[in-house]
Amino acid sequence: MILQHEGQPLSALPDCDAGYIIMEPTEYPAMSGSNTMCVATVLLETGMVEMHEPVTTVRLEAPGGPIDVTAGCRAGKVEWVDDRGERGSARALVNVA
């Protein structure tokens, strides 16, 4: 997650609750469903983003674009997560030959 110096979630997009970068051993992918679910769960269960039971909607900024996440919540815990990303597009294509 990208955090401000106060430890609060940060996003470059005003309509997103938080932004995050996916770091894997060999690459930085634009989107990962499992990482998105984990980030949403941490944000909600730690109170960094306010939880609304029984269902909370969170909008996250991933490298590939905004992702709308719906989480089923009960007793302060996330029980399930569903994510829907927007259609992505390349800003620039590079021919590597």
Image (spheres, helix red, strand yellow):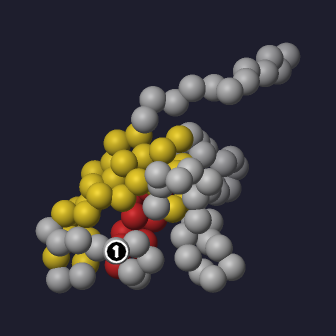
Q: Quadrant of the N terminus?
A: bottom right
Q: Residue at x 60, y 46 (%)?
A: 63
Rendered location of residue 91, percent (x, y): 68, 27
Q: Is residue 3 visible?
A: yes
Above-or-below relation of 41 to 83: below
Instruction: Give SS at disc 1.
Output: loop
Camera-nearest residue between 94 and 27:
94
| Outermost residue to the right | 97
Quarter-of-image position of residue 11: bottom right
Q: Position of residue 81 (x, y in %)?
A: 28, 58
Q: Quadrant of the C terminus?
A: top right
Q: Badge 1: how crowded within 10 Å, few (<14), some, or many (20+)?
A: some
Relative to 57, is 74 above or below? below
- Quarter of the image where one finds residue 96: top right
Residue to which mark 1 is pinned? 50
Residue plotted at (47% across, 52% down): 15
Name the spot of residue 30 as percent of width and height, x first.
Answer: 58, 42
Is residue 34 visible from the viewing direction of this image? no
Foreground residue, 29 or 13?
A: 13
Q: Image quadrant of residue 38? A: bottom left
Residue occupying image coordinates x 73% and y 21%: 93
The residue lying furthest to the front in this view is: 14
Q: What amino acid is labelled 1 in the image? A: Glu
How many badges with numbers are in the image? 1
Q: Position of residue 58 (x, y in %)?
A: 36, 58
Name which residue lies at 52% across and 30% down: 88
